[in-house]
Amino acid sequence: MIYHSVKETIKTVGGAFLVKDLELLRDASQESGKYQFVLENKVAPFIKEISTCIDAQIIYIVPGSIEGRTQPYADRVLTFGSLSNTIKSPFAQEWRVIQKHLCKLDNLSQRTRNHQRLTTVTSERFPTLNRQKNWEGTFKFEEMVKFCQAHGDEIIIGFNGGKSQLATKSLSYLENRLHYKWDYVNNIAGKKLSDWISGSQVIRILRRHNKYPTE
């Protein structure tokens, strides 16, 4: 995962590059003011500590319904309900409203958060065909590759035609594909298995057939 890669880099060279990355974002953004505010007010007072840090932590803030699934990928997981409803800030009143609504998401699944419900279509040929979003999320190509490298056989990637079709596609096609669906390997119910490839297999195919530099 990208965050784990960044954490390892911090362990090796310190955190100074994070400040430089933020400066690059500021210089490239049409809304540079918000980045400058963070640099001046949140980063500058701790620039020495950030630059010499070699022990970063990955902290996720997620709905309570996925806390257990997220824990293996983070050093610490906070749910919306665990966030304080009071802060010392000029925006304390606004935060109370935001925190209240975030807490409503804690016990909702991804499907209910997106107002999706299971619909059953019946016909002679397809007596019980479920039309639903049946995957965890999507990635662009480079994000997908890094995710496969980090999680290997723990995750699966959706690709019509599976391994045989992936092996026939050019690197240019794969890089410009709109998105790649992914899911956890233990969430196979309702899927056409021939259209899903483990993360480890994706990496092997990219190396063998596309000479993609995945190292």
Image: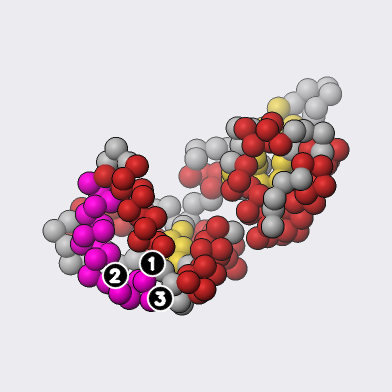
Can you tell which of label 1 and label 3 is closer to the viewer?
1
Residue 94 can be seen, yes or no: yes
Q: Residue type at mark 2: give it.
A: Ile
Q: Is residue 16 magenta?
A: no
Q: How crowded is mark 1: few (under 14 residues within 10 Å), some or many (20 or more)?
A: some
Residue that protrudes farthest toward the top in the picture: 124
Q: Residue 7: x percent and y percent?
A: 51, 68
Residue at (29% x, 37% y) in the render: 30
Placement of the N terminus among the 4 image quadrants = bottom right
Q: Which residue is drawn at 21% across and 60% down?
A: 40
The tag earlier along the polypeptide, 2 or 3, is 2
**What secondary structure is the magenta-colored segment mainly?**
helix
Badge 3: few (under 14), some or many (20 or more) residues near its Cα, within 10 Å? Answer: some
Q: Could you tell which of marks 1 and 3 lies nearer the N-terminus?
A: 1
* Residue 42: in magenta span: yes
Question: What's under tag 1, amino acid-wise?
Answer: Ala
Mark 2 vs mark 3, CA separation in Å: 10 Å
In the displayed orientation, state which residue is furthest to the left.
Answer: 90
| Front residue of this view, candidates 5 and 190 | 5
What residue is drawn where x is 46% and y is 59%? 62
N-term mark: 1 or 2: 1
Q: In which quarter of the image is the C terminus?
A: bottom right
Q: Is mark 3 on a helix, strand or loop?
A: loop
Residue of label 1: 16
**Image-based side of 86 in relation to 81, left or right:** left
Circle 3 residue: 53
- Dot 1 falls on a residue whose secondary structure is helix
Q: In the rendered structure, which segment of residues is drawn in magenta?
A: 33-53
Classify mark 2: helix, strand or loop.
Answer: helix
Q: Name the residue under label 2.
A: 47
User: Residue, x 54% and y 69% (percent of image)?
Assistant: 8
